[in-house]
Amino acid sequence: MTDMQNAILFHQYDISPFSEKVRVAFGIKGLTWHAVDQPVIMPKPELTALTGGYRKIPVMQIGADVYCDTQIILRELEKRYPTPSLFVGGDRGLGWGMGLWTDRVLFQAAVAVIFGTTDGFADEAFMKDREKLMGRPFNADEMKAGAPMLMEQLRAQLDWLNEQLGDKRAFLMGDKAGIADVNAYYNLAFIRWIAPVGSAVIDTFSNVTAWEKNIQDIGHGDRKELGREEALDIAKATTSTEAQVADPGEPNGLKPGDQVHVMADDYGRDPIAGELVSSSPQHVAIKRNDPRVGDVVVHFPRAGFFVMKTA
Ligand SMILES: N[C@@H](CCC(=O)N[C@@H](CS)C(=O)NCC(=O)O)C(=O)O
C-alpha cells in the first residue's frame, strides 16, 4: 500500500473525451498512472463514495485527495510534476482561459456533430442517463436538424487551429506540446472515434491533421490498470496532504472550517457537501467522510464552479 499512496489513480473510461485531455498530459509529462475504469452511465457507487456525488469523468485520486474536473487535475499535475511544464511559452494565464472555449463552445460543437450525424451510438439507457445529467431531453431528431449549423461552427473553430499552425509549427504554441494542445486535441479525438462526417471536416485542414499526428506520437505515458475497490482501499488507508489555508481575498468571506456546498455551473450540478479546508482564486478543497473511504479531501476548480455556504 505504501508504494501506492502517491500513485496517480485516474478514474476514467476509454471513450471519455475529457479523459483523453488528461491522458495526453500524462504523455507530455511522461508519467506513470493507474487507470481505474468507471461505468459510462450511473450508478457509479465507487466513484461517488470518493467524490460525495460528483459523477463526471475523469476524476484523479492521489491517496485520500480527490480531484474533480480536468482543470484542477491539470493544475495538480503541474504542481506535483512541474517538468516538463504544460506551459510552453507565454500562456501561463491564457492557457487556462482557453480551456473554457475548448471545454464548452468547441466541445458542444463536437458533441452536436457527433450525435447529429452518427446513428446507433447512443442506446436507450445512455440517452436516459444523459437526459438526467443535462436536465433536458435527449432529442435525436433535434440534434439531426441542428447538425448543419453546428458543423459550420465546428469548421470555423478548426480553422482557428489551422491558422495557428500555419507556420508549420509542430504544436499550437511552438515546438513543444502544452496546455493549448491538450485542451483542443481531445475534441478532435472524440469526433474521430465516432463520427465519420465530423472526421471528414477535420480532414479538410492539413495543418490540423499533421498536428493530430504529432500529439498521437506523444502517447499517454505509462498506463497501468487498477480495480475500483483497490482504489477505495487506498483512500481509506491514507490521509489527505492538503493543509488548511485561509484565503484572504475570498469574495464571499468563506474560511476554513465553514460547511459549504460546491457545484458545477453547467451540467451535472449535483451539490457536494463538505467542510472547507483551503481555497484560492483557482481552487477549493473540502473535507468529507464516507464509511467506505474514511476522511477524504475533494478538490474543485473555481472557474466553472460555485461554492456556497451551507445554510
Ligand atoms: N468540466 C468537466 C467535464 C467532464 C465531462 O463532461 N465528462 C463527461 C465524460 S467525457 C461525463 O462526465 N459524462 C457523463 C458521465 O460520464 O457520466 C471536466 O473538465 O472534467
Image (cartoon, rainbow, N blue to C red):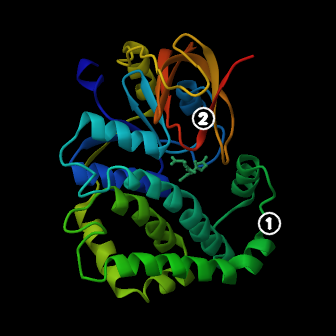
SS label for mark 2: loop
Q: Quadrant of residue 117?
A: bottom right
Q: Position of residue 175 (x, y in %)?
A: 19, 68
Which residue is most to the top? Answer: 257
Q: Give the image quarter of residue 67.
A: top left
Visible residue check, residue 36: no
Picture coordinates of residue 66, whole percent (x, y): 45, 29
Nearer to the camera, 95 or 287: 95
State the residue at coordinates (49%, 86%).
200
Q: Is residue 160 depicted above or below 204 in this figure?
A: above
Q: Amino acid at mark 1?
A: Asn
Q: Using the image as rendered, state which of residue 284 and residue 136 is in the foreground.
A: 284
Q: Is residue 143 left or right of residue 109?
A: right
Asked whether mark 1 lies closer than 8 Å to ligand 1, one says no
The type of residue carrying mark 2 is Tyr
Give the x, y percent position of residue 189: 44, 68
The quadrant in which residue 64 appears is: top left
Note whether 23 is above or below 81 in the view shown: below
- On the rendered image, what quadrant is the N terminus found in? top left
> Is residue 244 shown above or below 27?
above
Q: Which residue is mark 2?
A: 54
Pick the residue in front: 181 or 12: 181
Tag of residue 22: none
Considering only order in the chain, which callout, 1 or 2, is on the residue closer to the N terminus? Answer: 2
Q: Is residue 211 left or right of residue 249?
A: left
Q: Assign the C terminus to one quadrant of the image.
A: top right
Relative to residue 78, is residue 86 depicted above or below?
Answer: below
CB of mark 2 within 8 Å of CB of mark 1?
A: no
Q: What label does residue 139 carry, if any? A: 1
Q: Nearer the viewer, residue 206 or 118?
A: 206
